[in-house]
Image: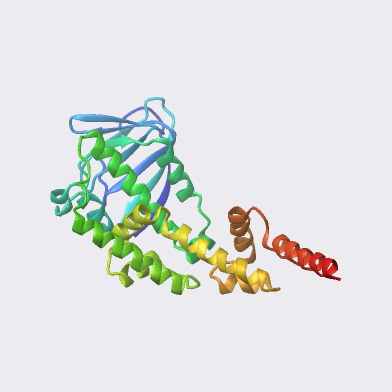
Amino acid sequence: MVSVLDVHCHPSDCACSAEEFSSCDEIVFPTGGVFVKHLRGEDVVADAGRAVFFRRDVPYRVSHPDGHGDRCTVLRYSRDVLRDAVGAYDPQAAEQSGSFFRFSHCPADRQVYQMQTRFRTRRPETDRTDGSADELGIRILDSVLCAAYAAAGVHPPKSSPVTARVHREIADGTRTLLARRFRERLTLQEIARAVHCSPFHLARIFRREVGSSLHRHVTSLRLRAALERLADGEGDLTALALELGFSSHSHFTDAFRREFGIAPRDFRGSLSRSREKSKILKV
């Protein structure tokens, strides 16, 4: 659904490049240096405070006013995801056969910039087991589009009572599914298919209705199950981690410590000491 590229540009001078085209819609986050994107009738200064839209098949040129290069994170989304995302703000644009983007750029506030940094530096070994990459990518897309349309005075329409009820039902159905299958390594697409919703809409609806991401909710269920198993005397932490869907012992330990403020081994030890103390007091 979403892919990421790191692009480094090393120009030899300040001159404009030859005319270029993007083969697909892209969102570009400058992460170092500065460049100017020259469109017909508009010049866009691209620095770390902006997200820049590169529209499919729309020509442009690039120059570097300081004579140095730039570094960028480039996000590419499937057309199905883009259609759903843009359709939430602009249904007509979502029906276009060319570029889905109407804008050349939008502000990249600190939250969006932090999210793209997390996405770019994420750990591939955990992405395969927790589905967080696609969900984070969708959240970045929605945040960027929200900023772009808000700057143009366009906001998503408010949900009708019927739509609000459907969204609650989708969120409740998803919670029920995850309560039964949180040990499995389900992708966002698989969860969306099971509750008859698109991945983009599911990610948005669940966060709004439940107050957390799907990834965070699944991790929380896994960790609570781990807590109960440790309280029951579970000894093999690696086996427990893999059984509950974590990629490794260290992945499980890191998540457990963030959730409860203590490592699972230390938590298990504290329970053992409490039991021993209780036995002594009873004697």
Give the residue at x 53% y 70%: 245
Q: Residue 111 placed where, x, y %? A: 42, 40
| Total number of numbered discs in the rendering | 0
Q: Residue 19, relative to residue 233: is it above or below?
A: above
Q: Residue 155 placed where, x, y %? A: 22, 41
Give the residue at x 86% y 71%: 283
Q: Is residue 174 left or right of residue 218?
A: left
Give the residue at x 31% y 55%: 77
Name the residue nearer the viewer: 102 or 277: 277
Q: Residue 128 placed where, x, y %? A: 48, 65
**Quadrant for the N terminus in the image:** bottom left
Q: Is residue 198 left or right of residue 112?
A: left
Q: Residue furthest front?
A: 282
Identify the image quadrant of residue 254.
bottom right
Identify the image quadrant of residue 58.
top left
Which color mode does the image show?
A: rainbow
Name the residue nearer the viewer: 227 or 76: 227
Q: Residue 246 placed where, x, y %? A: 56, 67
Name the residue nearer the viewer: 279 or 104: 279
Q: Is residue 149 left or right of residue 269?
A: left
Name the residue nearer the viewer: 269 or 191: 269
Q: Residue 82, relative to residue 269: is it above or below?
A: above
The answer to whether residue 150 of the structure is visible from this angle is yes
The answer to whether residue 10 of the structure is visible from this angle is no
Q: Residue 73, relative to residue 222: is it above or below?
A: above
Give the residue at x 39% y 58%: 134
